[in-house]
Image (cartoon, helix red, strand yellow):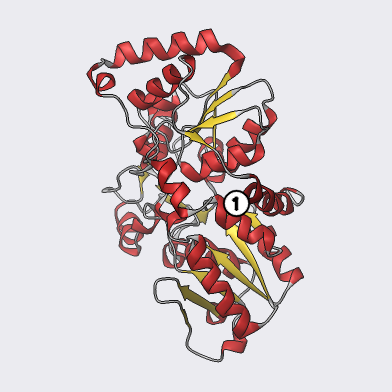
Amino acid sequence: MSILEYFEEKKSGTLPDSYRNLTREQMESRILEIKQRLGEKLFIPGHHYQKNEVIQFADVSGDSLQLAQLCADNEKAEHIVFCGVHFMAETADILTSDNQKVYLPDMRAGCSMADMADIFQTDRAWDALVEQFGETIVPLTYVNSTAAIKAFVGKNGGATVTSSNAHAMVKWAFAQKERILFLPDQHLGRNTAFDIGIPLEQMAIWDPINDKLDYEGNPEDILVILWKGHCSVHENFTVKNTADVREQYPAMRIIVHPECSREVVSMADDSGSTKYIIDAIENAVSGSQWAIGTEMNLVNRLIQSHPDKQIISLNPSMCPCLTMNRIDLPHLLWSLESIEGGEEVNVIKVDKETSKDAVKALERMLERA
């Protein structure tokens, strides 16, 4: 998908004002009725970070890749309304069949991390890095990236990774070549590489704004090149947050997502993917105390689901993911009524060439799942 096509698609639908005048009860009733009428023709996956008002209508909830795989496994659904963000809906379209359509209720639901690595920056970076290091680099991209970046990685012999399998995929990459380029989240890349034994001193940062490699030392020592990107939610968990929890709640365990900075992860008791965090809380003993460093909608849901445990957010001032929260009841209802009326607004469609290369990156990972 070209950048022009991307922005054309982004403005393909605007919520009619009439939906903002409906009560919550009216919207919930109409959504339920449409779900009943469309039956198996409709499938609504919802990401863990979605608001409760939306997640209540999800047929399944999960992380981004898990939901995309569930979409691919659901051969009966003709219409997939993805309650998440743009790159997730792209991945679902890549993995589903041509007779299935994927919709994003609000095209403004993007991901700031994914947007920190566009294909033009990546092409320039790759040319410069190959010129400097030769054919010694394999690219890896977090699934939290655009279809174009996944396709770039697939075309250049690399693979996608998730926060659940990042350790295995980084080890796989080092079995292929001497160095890795990790896109677009520097923190997940740094934390993962450190965990498998790569010293911080052998990690460099690629600055896509200034098109330069930031590294002090002999470039030949570099094993990991980290793209200068981050999650705007997880980067807001700080060393001070962890120190404050230690002081106020000495018995409280701190668990964080690996999209947090290296300093925060090193101070935590545990770290892992969204699913890992959910499982850890569910399996914890009654009466245990937890400070969680991840998105606020999920933390609040865990608090509500586990009243027998003391659970707080690691950052008391944390707010939910703003772009994820673009999906709300008015947009969900509008999407469903448009489908039923044959209008089909905000369809996410990845072109065949991009899909073909992106699938290579996804399959290299799934083969090792």
Tell me: residue 272, above or below residue 18. below
Q: Position of residue 197 (x, y in %)?
A: 63, 72
Tell me: residue 349, above or below residue 345. below
- Secondary element at tag 1: loop
Q: Position of residue 248 (x, y in %)?
A: 29, 53
Which residue is at a point 56% across and 50% down the rendered structure image? Answer: 147
Count of marks overlaid on the render: 1
Q: Is residue 254 visible?
A: no
Quadrant position of residue 329:
top left
Which residue is at a point 37% across and 52% down the rendered structure image? Answer: 233
The residue closer to the viewer here, 132 or 214, is 132
The residue closer to the viewer here, 75 or 65, is 75
Quadrant position of residue 31:
top left
Q: Position of residue 297 (x, y in %)?
A: 38, 37
- Amino acid type at image mark 1: Thr
> Dot 1 corresponds to which residue?
162
Which residue is at a point 69% across and 25% down the rendered structure image? Answer: 75
Q: Is residue 71 left or right of residue 184?
A: right
Tell me: residue 336, above or below residue 250. above
